[in-house]
Amino acid sequence: MAEAAVAQNMPVGRSVGLFLADGTPHGPVVAGIGNWSGKVIAGPRSRIAELLRRPEASRTGVYIQVGPDPDRPGELLGYIGEADDVAARMRHHLRSDSKDFFERVAFVVSSDDSLTKAHARYLESRLIRLTRDAGTVVLVNDTAPEFNRLPEADRADMETFIEQLRLILPLVGFDLFRFRRPVSTPAAAGTDGTPVFSFSTGGASARARETADGFVVLPGSTARTATSGTFQAG
């Protein structure tokens, strides 16, 4: 019985399909999961023309834009919207200075045209709420529409749809739902059992630990003030 209970709580593996439309990791990417009816098309702003020419881009769906926050170095701004024709709405945004911050965009549509305007409005509402609750990406949306006018069965289907998006969006560069961790002083080296990495060269000496948010440099670390011969200043 105990083994069965443990097995029920174990994470289940998932298979995600990523299609590199131009054969490179830096161009348009089409992502999906097995029998899921949804599809995500993502890519950099520099390839927006190719993304907009794809037939899926003219469907009803949700679009997500992300880019650097000029007021918070290293942080991101985002915008989430919905449209009957995603490509047409994106072309409008491209002519607007207020949405000029983004460097990457994703279109969330269905592979079988099953998403209606009501479905898209529900998805927009829920994705805005989930992103704001997480706090990692700051949205520039002026409003946070609440849309619940869907039949109960449709709401359940959309919540399942969102669970697939939680898995796919981070894989194509949209980590919207990862909760921001409070900034805290790292624990003393080794007191929690995690390894401490050391680096020392050319007058610099640093120590760091790996956390869920990446490497954290420990207090007392130093860096070089001048570049080396293998790294030229820009």
Image: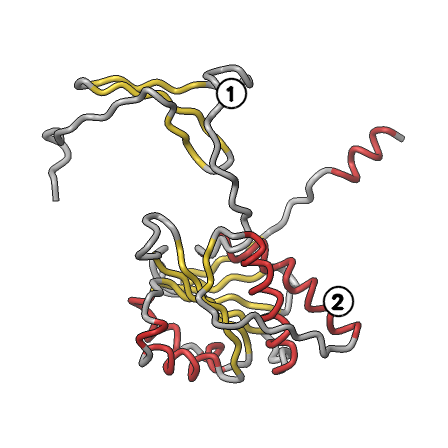
Q: Which mark is residue 194?
A: 1
Q: Which residue sits at x=89%, y=31%?
A: 1
Q: At 72% across and 38% down in the image, what residue appears?
A: 10
Residue 36 pos. (x, y %): 64, 64
186 lies left or right of 60:
left
Element class at badge 1? loop
Instruction: Indicate the quadrant where residue 163 lies.
Output: bottom right
Which residue is nearer to you in this view: 219 or 11? 219
| Image quadrant where residue 208 sits | top left
Q: Is residue 187 above or below residue 124?
A: above
Q: Does the CB distance between marks 2 and 1 fall below 8 Å?
A: no
Q: Nearer the viewer, residue 119 or 14?
A: 119
Between 21 and 79, the residue placed more toward the observer is 79
Sequence-wise, the earlier of marks 2 and 1 is: 2
Q: Residue at x 60, y 76 (%)?
A: 120
Query: Is residue 2 in view?
Result: yes
- State the CA–CA distance, disc 2 to disc 1: 41 Å
Quick one: quadrant of the C terminus? Answer: top left
- Residue 130 appears at what percent x and percent y? 59, 59
Q: Quadrant of residue 12?
A: top right
Kind of residue at badge 2 = Ala
Q: Which mark is residue 156?
A: 2
Label 1 neighbourhood size at 10 Å, few (<14), some (14-19), many (20+)? few
| Marking on residue 4 | none
Classify residue 181 as left or right of residue 42: right
Residue extending farthest right: 1
Residue 93 image position (x, y, % from top left): 37, 78
Residue at 32%, 49% (x, y): give it.
Answer: 73
In the figure, 26 relative to 116: above or below? above
**What amino acid is found at the position of numbered circle 1 in the picture?**
Thr
Height in image: 150 above or below 140?
A: below
